[in-house]
Image (cartoon, rainbow, N blue to C red):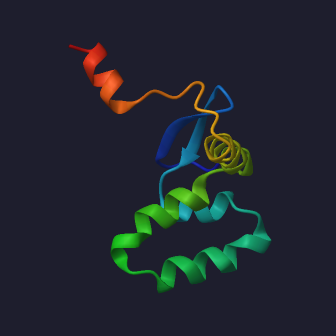
Amino acid sequence: MSEGPVLRTVIGGQAVDLPASLDGIRAALPEEQREAFDREVGAAPIADVPLIAARWSLPQEAHDEEEEMLRRLRDGDFSGFSDVDDAAEAGR
């Protein structure tokens, strides 16, 4: 990864540093994806740029992990998830 600001997140149980600037995200992308990134960021309303940048900064493993979680939820498997009300009540 290039030098510059980073964000730390957890993907697959491992801490991962992600680029935290548009230039850093672009540099980390494979060459064949950079033009699409430029077009999407360049055409986006300014309020949408942080969400677009976050999506582009994540590696495919993070997208796969998210899809698996959504699949489980759609299938009715809520194991490993907690209800917001239950969590709030437990903290009292």
Where residue 34 sits, quadrant-wise, is bottom right
Asked if residue 31 lies left or right of residue 74, the reply is right
In the picture shown, does residue 83 fall above or below 43? above
As drawn, 34 above or below 30: below
* Image position, residue 82 (x, y; %): 45, 27
**Residue closest to the far left:** 92
The location of residue 86, given as percent across then percent down, is 34, 23
Asked if residue 32 lies left or right of residue 74, the reply is right
Seen at 57% across and 45% down, the residue is 18
The vertical placement of 8 against 87, above or below, is below
Residue, x 77% and y 70% (percent of image)? 31
**In screen coordinates, is 8 left or right of 76?**
left
Q: Residue 46 versus residue 86: which sits nearer the camera?
A: 86
Question: Which sits in the foreground, 28 or 39?
Answer: 39
Residue 27's spot in the image, x, y percent? 65, 62
The answer to whether residue 84 is above or below residue 48 is above
Q: Residue at horizontal 40%, vertical 71%?
A: 48
The answer to which of 75 and 91 lies nearer the viewer is 75
Q: Quadrant of the C terminus?
A: top left
Q: Where in the figure is residue 77, as x and y percent of width and height?
A: 64, 34
In this figure, what is the number of numbered marks? 0
Image-based side of 40 in relation to 82, left or right: right
